[in-house]
Amino acid sequence: MRSTTLLLLATAIVACTGTKTTTAPAAPASAVPTDAVRELSRMGSDAVLWQNASAEAYWIYKQAYQQALTRMMWNVVERAKAYRDNETRRPMAVIVDIDETVLDNSPYQVETVKSGRTFDQAEWKVWTDKASAKPSPGALEFLLMAKEASCEVFYITNRDVRERASTLKNLADAGFPFADEAHLLLMEGTSDKTERRARVRATHDVVLLVGDQLRDFDERFKDRSVKDGKATVDAMADSLSKYFVLLPNPMYGTYRDAVQGKGTDAEKLQRMQEWFQRNGY
Ligand SMILES: [Mg+2]
């Protein structure tokens, strides 16, 4: 027993010495998470677990993409009927978001929870540089069917322009159609996708949009001031039903930003705690 303890101690000393003499890479600024960061990270752990590992999330994605296929086909038929005989037909398109829509970044989110951190742009880029995100369940099959149905696919994402090459590589390696510069509209200055959607609509008949955020359909969903945005959902239910399919993402997004607001992690944590104080029964 005693010799085991000594062995462990010796191993620990060697390990520590090794750490000191090794040239370690420069630690990122967030290497030592503050208590607020750790607490915020811990608050997100159930959401990350659900998204990454649950059969429920897996099936909801597949179910949603089945629904997307049905809606797309109905809208394709309707568009075709709407054209008069001599009218020149415009090409049709499907618009999809990328993150948590066609690519699954939950492994990155698992890493943040594991290390007690929250989202960090530099660490995110390390992840996207790997270009190894797996397709979301059902996404690849749906987009290949969209191509079969003569719909071009446009990827409108809030990844930034420095992630262009790795994003295209990830999409192409995974087998997604239209993984080229002309069909990838990255964030250039604003997270508001309205102008980028308009650019696609200027040349194409858009038959369906798919995203994990309601803002992937319409920027009006950024406003959560009236009934947490549910009033806007009710007001737009008809067009949502016909032209949009929403995927689940409890890990991050407008719903959480509306509560946390902007500022330091300590301020975000404070607002989260206040939200829980105010609600319930
Ligand atoms: Mg997304």
Image (cartoon, rainbow, N blue to C red):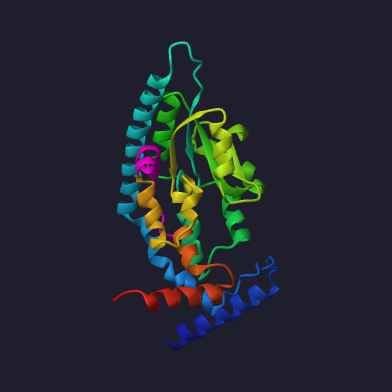
Does residue 25 appear to the left or right of 100 in the view shown?
A: right
The residue nearer to you, when weighing 57 against 11, is 57
Extent of the magenta region: 238-253
Quarter of the picture containing the C terminus is bottom left
Q: Is residue 280 left or right of residue 143?
A: left
Quadrant of the rendering where the N terminus is positioned: bottom left
- 208 up-or-down from 39: above or below: above
Q: Nearer the viewer, residue 105 or 146?
A: 146
Q: Compared with residue 75, is residue 266 higher up or lower down, i.e. above or below?
A: below
Residue displayed at 68% across by 65% down: 25
The percent position of residue 237, horizontal first and vertical second, equals: 35, 46
| The quarter of the displayed image where residue 266 is located | bottom right
| Residue located 43% across and 49% down the image | 212
Quadrant of the rendered structure where residue 15 is?
bottom right
The one nearer the camera, 44 or 110, is 44
Q: Position of residue 37 (x, y in %)?
A: 53, 73
Q: Inspect this view and state whether residue 154 appears.
A: yes
Magenta stretch contains residue 251: yes
Q: Position of residue 178 (x, y in %)?
A: 53, 31
User: Extreme bottom residue here?
Assistant: 2
> Would you say residue 130 is visible in this rendering?
no
Residue 145 lies in the magenta stretch: no
Q: Looking at the image, is 173 positioned above or below residue 221?
A: above
Q: Position of residue 98 (x, y in %)?
A: 50, 45
